[in-house]
Amino acid sequence: MAVGKISAREHLAQNRLSLGANTKEVAKTTHWSLRRDADAIAWLVLDRAGESTNTLSEAVMAELETLLNTIETMQAKGLVIRSGKAGGFIAGADIRDFSGVSETDAVEARMTRAHEIVDRLAALPMPTVAVVHGHCLGGGLELALACRFRIAVEGAVFGFPEVLLGLHPGLGGTFRLPALIAPVEAMKMMLTGKSVHSGKAKALGLVDTVIEERHVGNAVKAAIGGKLKRPRRSAGLSGFSLFRGIAARKMRSMAAKRAPQEHYPAPHRLIDLWEQHGGGEKEVMQKEEIRSFARLLTGETAQNLIHVFFLRESLKAGGKGKSGIAHVHVVGAGTMGGDIASWCAARGLRVTLTDLDEKALAAAIGRAGKLFDKRLYSKIDRRDAFDRMIPDFAGDGVRQADLVIEAVAEKAEVKRKVFKAVAPLMKKGALLATNTSSIPLSELRTAVPFPERLLGLHFFNPVARMELVEVVAHDKVSDAAQARLAAFCGSIDRLPAPVKSSPGFLINRVLTPYITEAFLMLDEGVRRETIDQAAVSFGMPMGPLELADRVGLDICLEVARTMKSGLDTPLPDVPGWLETMVAEGRTGRKAGRGLYEYDRNGEPRKSGQRLAPHPTMTDRLVLPMLNTCVTCLREGVVGDEKTLEGAMIFATGFAPFRGGPLRYARARGFAEIIAVLERLQEKYGDRFAPDPHWVKLPVT
């Protein structure tokens, strides 16, 4: 039965969540249920109708205000706030309410009203308890902070991800969190957007206790009965403006490295708020929080990042469904193969990993251990992940696997050899996927007797950080196989981007002119640091030369050759020095040397002396990417703009604050983009010729 069709109590019972003993309904609204148990404790449950996740919409907040009227008069011993969703507490505000807003005064009025409601909750004369399971984020955490006690069910996760939307907390978090835990730790949570697990939340003092679900009832009684006491905490040095000034300077320096103020104002506004008002009256800080939040929300950066949020949701929706894949067999234990295998094991799948080189297998298992230590919170989870990841020297796992992933060298003849070896051993109905980064599947499918079950599954490096996966189809593949592979991506928390097989697919097709243009600039005598700075100043996470080293110059060379031979689009010749570097083993970061030299931590050694890049350099790098995006739309390599925009952001890091390549192009103006491309074409050659599809794109 769908959420919203049954009562909150029935929904909780189905998922075995505690809701007091012998409760009686007091009030019911569309999204909330208020009940009173045998101990005169009120239980207020949010189970947002018609939604899989709880969020704080205007309607939800209005209903909360109505129910507070009842709660204030019902003479309960205490109030418990819970979620009726099995997945978690509250995921934050309803982002749909934020999209497209432009009137700062209207936002201030809305937020002021929301604060009044939360303040009423905080002012209730009875003990209030937030019982949190699963995710508790953004506005959900701010609602929990307004309660006197917070009880976490084991595994709960707490965080303020607003900074990822170009915002800072706006429902009281900027003053309630620093009043509860160490202010510097509070600022770290808000500035980074990183979540903390229940154990860390307890250590910080964010929650009062961490329990298993079966102990919720007793923990609630202890809290309301005064047996769960929070130690008093002093504000320490944060009450002094001198200390806040020193700490704020350090915070600004660190924030500027990750989020330049001209591109991402939110963290810098948050630091200003804390420095100027963190030691003062709560009412002043509250008023300034609302004002700052409203200005950020109506700004270009926040609106673009909210657009990016919906792009992610669109890609995520493509990964829903059941894949039927429980066992993955990976052929090739190099960096990509090993990391794909360990990620799948960390996400709960049984994995067999095979390679002809036993040292490669051992190295892959070592890297897996580091991933499990970093990403999995409990010893049991880490142990279970290791149990699921099986070194398979003989390659026997292929016989039981639901999905076989080939991740060997980027050479068509090597991949075809692997296919011919594994295809006869695969069980009926199993899928075969290649992690090729550029080779058209038409060149590979001749090696298998079942082309309808052969697809591309292109992960990006590093696998654990890059969310996007290209799901590459060809004209012989079945729709069912595509759907299963997309669902597989969703099951391992990756974002599937469906693309058509062609040289370079989508991402490498777009990145190749970006990187090769940087190679040409090197040949022109421009310093490598200056070239990279031209891209970083635009908003890219790293420059094209550092990116080439990160990808691997050997991979870049093979992609460039594939693109040069397989496309009619004008591309520069592959530089001779690139072939020489690869032949000498200078393949980039993985080899410790490439276009840059690398230290023991894998960081490039860059000269501090560099010339500021000319704006023309940025256009030479960025506009070919935009032009190729339009070409890919025209050729049907990607089916729609949403997939294109999302893929570029989540696979290349394309300046998220700009909202995506085509959103940036629209903001700048298609006519100007075309005019600049034509000027570059006249000066540098036909590789800059504007694609004819520009004039067919909608301008808004």
Image: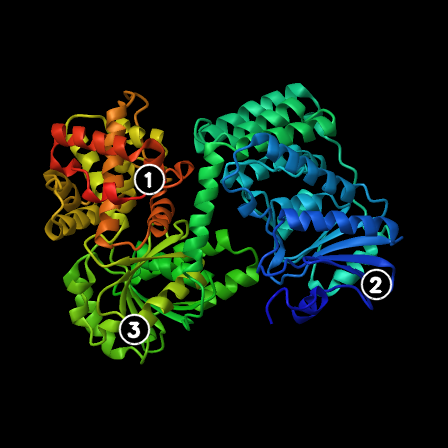
The foreground one among 673 and 442 is 673
Q: Which residue is mark 3?
A: 394
Residue drawn at x 31%, y 70% as measured from the top left: 479
Q: Nearer the viewer, mark 2 or mark 1?
A: 1
Chain-order first, disc 1 or disc 3: 3
Viewed as shown, does residue 685 lie left or right of 275? Answer: left
Type of amino acid at the residue the image marks with label 2: Asp
Type of amino acid at the residue the image marks with label 3: Ala
Residue drawn at x 17%, y 50% as measured from the top left: 558
In the rendering, at what x and y percent does residue 94 appear? 58, 48
Q: Which residue is mark 1?
A: 699
- For the question of whether residue 352 can be seen, the reply is no
Q: Quarter-wise, where is residue 104 in the image?
A: top right
In the displayed structure, would residue 253 be above or below residue 349? above
Residue at mark 3 to residue at mark 2: CA–CA distance? 61 Å
In the rendering, at what x and y percent does residue 461 appear? 33, 50
Q: Nearer the viewer, mark 3 or mark 2?
A: 2
